[in-house]
Image (cartoon, rainbow, N blue to C red):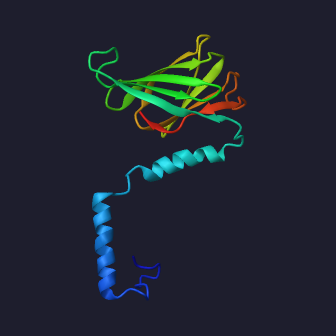
Amino acid sequence: MNTAEGSNPPHLTPEDQLLAEEIADVYRIVDPVPATLVERLQFALALEAWESPEFEILRMQEEAVLPAGVRGGEDSRTITFDSEILTIMISVSARDEYAVRVDGWLAPPGDHLVELRTGEGAHTVRADDQGRFVLDVVPRGLSQLVVRQGLDDPAQATILAVTPSLIL
């Protein structure tokens, strides 16, 4: 509650200042700022840096946690993203405490490059003619899918759709 110069605002008495600091302490305990907030904001703002904002931003439609015993083990979930031009369904399965496997399907299928952006870099694969793609070992953490037209040079390929950030 102090100003940049380190002094109390002129309109607060010392008692008011103490009360304001106690209220701030309560909020820090009861509703702290998420530890990953800055990372998530930077990750999301990276979209703004892309030169061509002519792509669809997909919406998360559903997320299902698969029960224990289902193929993929007890730490699996299925997430569906969708827009007017594209639907992506991914199944995320734990590999170990540091990595996951992502199996995905695009509808309608097409010759598309699928890039999974992570804090450790991008992982790019090409969807097959039925829209299926696999990212076998990717790090856990904040990520985002980017679908591009299927050119040989990903840097030249137009972005078709982007998912919101998600935690794998």
Instruction: Look at the image and tell me whether residue 20 can be seen.
Output: yes
* Residue 10 percent coordinates (x, y): 43, 89
Which residue corresponds to the image point at 53% horizontal and 38% vertical from the top-left? 164
Residue 106, position as x, y percentages in the image: 57, 19
Q: Quadrant of residue 124?
A: top right
The answer to whether residue 23 is above or below residue 39 is below
Q: Position of residue 136 (x, y in %)?
A: 45, 21
* Residue at x 65%, y 47% (from the top left corner): 49
Tell how many labels: 0
Name the image quarter holding residue 85: top right
Residue 147 point in image, percent of width and height: 61, 28
Give the image quarter of residue 1: bottom left
Q: Which quadrant is home to the C terminus?
A: top left
Q: Nearer the viewer, residue 159 or 124?
A: 159
Q: Residue at x 61, y 25 (%)?
A: 86
| Residue 136 in view, yes or no | no
